[in-house]
Amino acid sequence: MTGLRIGHGYDVHRLVPGRRLILGGVEIPWERGLEGHSDADVLTHAVMDALSGAARLGDIGKLFPDTDPAYAGISSLKLLGEVGRLLREEGYAVVNIDAVLLAQAPKVGPYREKMAENIAAALGIDPEQVNVKATTEEGLGFTGDGSGMAAHAVVLTERVL
């Protein structure tokens, strides 16, 4: 069976003091980081959920439960690599990824290309297949008031087996 499949991913994490801020595998200098069991990379988590959804693998909570100590503090890029392996095993290839980070601050423009490169490298695809963008929410909601960050990702996959 061949065909295209679309997946959508969404993730959210609270900003807290005493944590590093990791987005798309890039450590960004900031006074707070994202709270979570792993490195809490909200952008990579949204991409993982989109990919696992497109291939009907469930979600990252099913694949990498936060009750498992093996995932405590783990790099989300490592987990993304595992999602990529599972996709290939199921016969899917990534066509493209479009992801958006929702955060009032810090500005992430200077880091977007490196984020896309990291995501592509973890999946073994060309960085041209990955687009990362960011937006503020004009001071509205939990992302706008700086208490958290969120991310959405949409992916297109193709069944190749």
Image: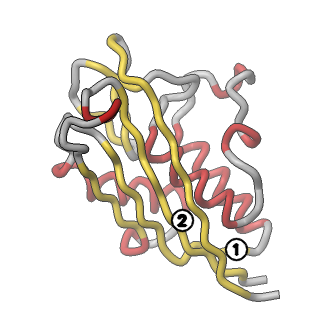
Secondary element at tag 2: loop
Three-letter amino acid code at disc 2?
Gly
Could you classify mark 1 by the number of other residues whose Cα lies within 10 Å: few (under 14), some (14-19), or many (20 or more)?
Answer: many
Q: How far from the left and from the top, in percent, is residue 69?
A: 71, 19
* Residue sitting nearer the eye, 86 or 32: 32
Can you tell which quarter of the image residue 123 is in? bottom right
* Residue sitting nearer the eye, 118 or 131: 131
Q: CA distance from mark 1 to mark 2?
A: 13 Å
Residue carrying label 2: 124
The N terminus lies in quadrant: bottom right
The C terminus lies in quadrant: bottom right
- First-in-chain label (1 vs 2): 1
Three-letter amino acid code at disc 1?
Tyr
Q: Is residue 126 above or below residue 115?
A: below
Q: How far from the left and from the top, in percent, is residue 139?
A: 20, 36
Q: Is residue 110 above or below residue 99?
A: above
1 vs 2, front mark: 1
